[in-house]
Image (cartoon, rainbow, N blue to C red):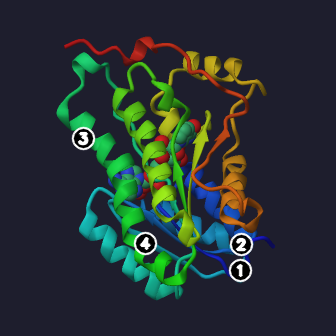
């Protein structure tokens, strides 16, 4: 097992690719603390399924809105106390509020920037003290192929590009102290997030543009998390790992995203 005894904190483990990552982590022996914001049922289900995969691991889950820095600090402190320490932090929580720029409200812009970019900053800052004390730690921050700019998703594109810059700065500030900050750029994975926001036509385009000619399976995202959390990636820092099946462009504007005023 690659991660036996490694203690991981992951945001957004109640569904989607975050949930799949929890399963891959426990498969490799990691103890996992994860968060949800609304779906407590989803969080309980994650624990139940993870315990079936590996009954020997320790698991905790917490309600957390990553936009709220006070809550983030409290949950980080609690997770460190409950787990003994935290070795790896995964910033995965995310939302979409798509609209064309002309029609985008302040709320749609702020919700997405606050959840992805500011949330990632809040969570990394909250665990830095523990990592510095341990003289070790790994941040894995989740961007998106949309960081290159996706029509109808300016808020999301900006946040996901920002996560790359933020993570590289983090690695430059603390890499020499044995603290890692890497980014995963996922391609297209079928989850509630993508299901609710992409038409069949867009999904089909994503598939056709990928070199593997298919969507990613959530467990394949989980395996990339395992790689960056483990010793296998000991010389990978400030880097960006693409887990896209070879998708290097995104489909043009989806007609469904056009909203009339
Ligand atoms: N799926 C893809 O193809 C894809 C591609 C590129 C990037 N990504 C990125 O991968 C991450 C996960 O995506 P997904 O598709 O798995 O999404 P998802 O199925 O919608 O799950 C989102 C997760 O984030 C949590 N969350 C949402 N808002 C939050 C907040 N303010 N504070 C804390 N947690 C919050 C949700 O908790 P609740 O369940 O409690 O609501 C849920 O656990 C996101 O960062 C997304 O941008 C996904």
Q: Is residue 175 above or below residue 203?
A: below
Residue extending farthest to the right is: 1
Work out whether residue 38 can be spotted: no
Residue 160 versus residue 223: which sits nearer the camera?
Answer: 160
Which residue is found at the position 26% from the left and 35% from the top? Answer: 109
- Tell which circle, 4 or 1, labels the residue nearer the N-terminal end: 1
Residue 258 on image: x %, y %: 34, 14
Disc 3 crowd rating (10 Å Cα; few below 14, some 14-19, many 20+) is some
4 vs 2, front mark:
4
Which residue is found at the position 50% from the left and 60% from the top? Answer: 42
Q: Is residue 18 above or below residue 204?
A: below
In three-dimensional space, the C-alpha distance between marks 2 and 1, rounded to whole angstroms, equals 6 Å
Q: Describe the element under mark 2 as helix, strand or loop.
A: helix
- Residue bearing the label numbered 1: 55
In three-dimensional space, the C-alpha distance between marks 4 and 2, rounded to whole angstroms, equals 29 Å
2 vs 3, front mark:
3
Q: Does residue 5 appear to the left or right of 118 in the view shown?
A: right
- Tell which circle, 1 or 3, labels the residue nearer the N-terminal end: 1
Which residue is found at the position 31% from the left and 42% from the top? Answer: 113
| Residue contact between numbered discs 2 and 1, judged by CB atoms under 8 Å | yes
- Tell which circle, 3 or 4, labels the residue nearer the N-terminal end: 3
Q: Which mark is residue 110?
A: 3
| Residue contact between numbered discs 2 and 3, judged by CB atoms under 8 Å | no
Residue 4: quadrant of the picture: bottom right
Q: Describe the element under mark 4 as helix, strand or loop.
A: helix
In three-dimensional space, the C-alpha distance between marks 2 and 3, rounded to whole angstroms, equals 39 Å
- Residue bearing the label numbered 2: 52
Q: Describe the element under mark 3 as helix, strand or loop.
A: helix
């Amino acid at each position: 097992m690659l991660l036996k005894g490694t203690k991981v904190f992951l945001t957004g483990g109640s569904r989607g690719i975050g949930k799949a990552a929890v399963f891959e982590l426990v498969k490799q022996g990691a103890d996992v603390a994860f968060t949800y914001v609304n779906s407590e049922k989803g969080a309980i289900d994650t624990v139940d399924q993870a315990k079936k995969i590996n009954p020997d691991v320790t698991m905790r889950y917490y309600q957390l809105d990553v936009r709220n820095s006070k809550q983030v600090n409290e949950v980080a402190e609690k997770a460190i106390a409950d787990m003994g320490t935290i070795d790896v932090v995964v910033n995965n929580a995310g939302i979409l509020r798509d609209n064309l720029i002309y029609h985008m409200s302040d709320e749609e812009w702020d919700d997405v920037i606050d959840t992805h970019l500011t949330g990632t900053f809040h969570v990394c800052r909250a665990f830095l003290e523990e990592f510095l004390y341990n003289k070790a730690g790994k941040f894995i921050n989740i961007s998106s192929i949309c960081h290159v700019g996706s029509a109808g998703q300016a808020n999301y594109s900006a946040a996901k590009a920002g996560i790359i810059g933020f993570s590289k700065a983090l690695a430059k500030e603390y890499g020499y102290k044995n603290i890692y900050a890497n980014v995963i750029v996922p391609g297209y994975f079928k989850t509630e997030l993508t299901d609710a926001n992409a038409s069949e036509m867009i999904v089909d385009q994503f598939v056709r543009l990928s070199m593997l000619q298919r969507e990613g399976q959530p467990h394949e995202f989980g395996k990339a998390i395992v790689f960056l959390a483990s010793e296998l990636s000991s010389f990978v820092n400030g880097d960006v790992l693409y887990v896209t099946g070879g998708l290097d462009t995104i489909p043009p504007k989806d007609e469904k995203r056009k909203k009339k005023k």
